[in-house]
Amino acid sequence: MTPPPTPSAETASPASAAAGALLDELVRRGVADIVLSPGSRSQALALTAAALARTGAVSLHVRIDERVAGFTALGLAVESGRPVAIICTSGTAVANLHPAVLEAHHSGVGIIVLSADRPAELRGIGANQTTQQPGIFGDLVRADWDVPAPTGAPGELDDARELAVLAVRASLDGPVHVNLAYREPLSGPISIDTGLALGEPPVSDAVAATVLDLHPDDATVVIAGHGAGPRAEQLAVDLGAPLIAEVSSGARFGRHAVVAYRDVLRGPHGEAVGRAIVLGHPTLSREVPQLLERGDVDVIVVRTPGVEDYNPGRRARVVDDVRVLGTPDPAVVRRWVGGWVSMSRAVLESDAPDDPAPDLSLAVSSDRGVRAAFAQAELAVLRAPIDRRMLARALWASTWPHDRLVLAASRLIRVADAIVPGKAIRVHANRGLAGIDGTISTATGIALAAARDGSTGTTRVLAGDLAVLHDAGALLVPLPEGIRLHVIVGNDGGGTIFDALEVAQTADPDDFATVMRTPHRADFASLAAAGGWAYRRATTRAELDDALTAPESLLLVEVPLEP
């Protein structure tokens, strides 16, 4: 094999020079955040990132392990709307980013993986921490470059800058992988532009190719899955249609929203549907895909750029956009939309708690006995034990537009989706693959980006116990002052989400408990203390209300729940 070139006299470390040009250009092109985990082979990238952060050109977030780093980057990208760079070293470090890359692929989130690697002469000979990194993410990434080790040759720095431009452009549709080989010396003196300014967020130049014209009718529903956004609510209004908006859709508000949509879809209103317009990625019910698989329903899916088309019946018309012609007949809207909303309200009222909140008018009664009865009823409400529905309702009621709410892939997100009313708040969930991975890390990224953009609100996470334990490493990361992050853990001692599956009726009960529920004995108070978080335990409504308005910046709230 030809020996590696000798670095030129002008460049003490070609690795540092190339890393500097690459990161400098990424910032110029709008990358505001860099997340990294430590490593030797990636030191040129890491030290350059640290130097850039010192100048204020970029925010740097250091994480011990790559799995936490990957989901932190995902949250930063989701909240900021900018691509986020992730730096890691070679070997298993790259593989630990795979879960976050998977989620980014299926949700179209722009993260740019910068993985350091051995040069060509050290590959394929059993060298330490060396594996097949090029192509490691397969088809999950929008672009994948394997960049030879820099030598200090003329033009290399220009090539590095051009690579940064291409990477940012490709990341507009999802994750990107840039594999960077480096030779020793792995770092040297770093020279950066102290006047470097952050570029504008990248904007896609894609133009909608297929726009479908639609007229309002009396048999259309609009379905807003995860990430659909407020456009879905406006479309429902323009079409005079009921709105089925999942809790993380960003469209769960307005007069057309149908909360108890599962029940309504199973009844005569659902049978009357003749056309369904789908935006985002529905994942929280069986009733929605069953509707879309019906042969008598005209299914139109509005494509989400960079994301696999949602088409459960493999028969939908997939378009880039829709345009509504004309206005709906008010009488039709009252009958069609009103019927859905009324049925939803009736379902929710029939399923309301047996002991509703006391009548506030009784508190000012002139009758001392009536006032005493009111006080007793109010006390009973405050002392009531917490169940999942109470937890979901209370958390939803405590969240406002300046806050952020992150819902884990736990049983609780389905409970919330079934009962919480319309409200225009920022809700996020990793629903690309609906995996349990990285929920707290994702929320951390969201909280960091929101705080930098001036938000004074609280980022709250609602998660089951297994989801929190799955991402426990995220609790051990020091966070800067000003970050308000509250993790609310519904602890039922294991994965009771599987109780609703058919397997629970057929499996041996002991085997089911062992391999499906996976019970644990985790001490969440000790876990919170290990990371320097405040801890509260809420067993009644009064304790829960106190916890949801707590002043602590970093808080873990444990809510024991019945299995």
Image (spheres, rainbow, N blue to C red):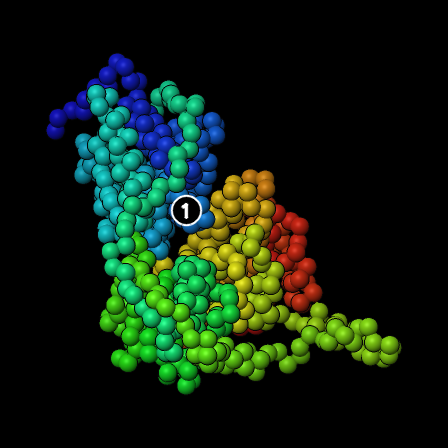
Q: Is residue 359 left or right of residue 169?
A: right
Q: Is residue 204 above or below residue 226?
A: above
Where's residue 300, x and y in %? 30, 68
Q: Residue at image x 28%, y 30%?
A: 161
* Residue 261 figure quarter: bottom left
Please rate how many residues cluster around mark 1, counting C-alpha atoms within 10 Å: few if below 14, some from 14 to 19, many from 20.
Answer: some
Judge whether residue 157 can be spotted in this image. Answer: yes
Residue under numbered circle 1: 81
Residue at the top extreme?
9
Q: Is residue 194 left or right of residue 459?
A: left
Q: Is residue 208 above or below residue 32?
A: below
Between 342 and 535, the one nearer to me in the picture: 342
Q: Is residue 478 above or below residue 343?
A: above
Judge whether residue 517 can be spotted in this image. Answer: no
Where's residue 382, x and y in %? 71, 69
- The three-letter amino acid code for the residue at tag 1 is Gly
Q: Residue at image x 33%, y 75%?
A: 275
Q: Quadrant of the N terminus?
A: top left
Q: Residue at image x 61%, y 60%?
A: 398
Q: Residue at image x 35%, y 41%?
A: 202
State the SS at label 1. loop
Where's residue 428, x and y in %? 46, 57
Where's residue 409, x and y in %? 44, 62
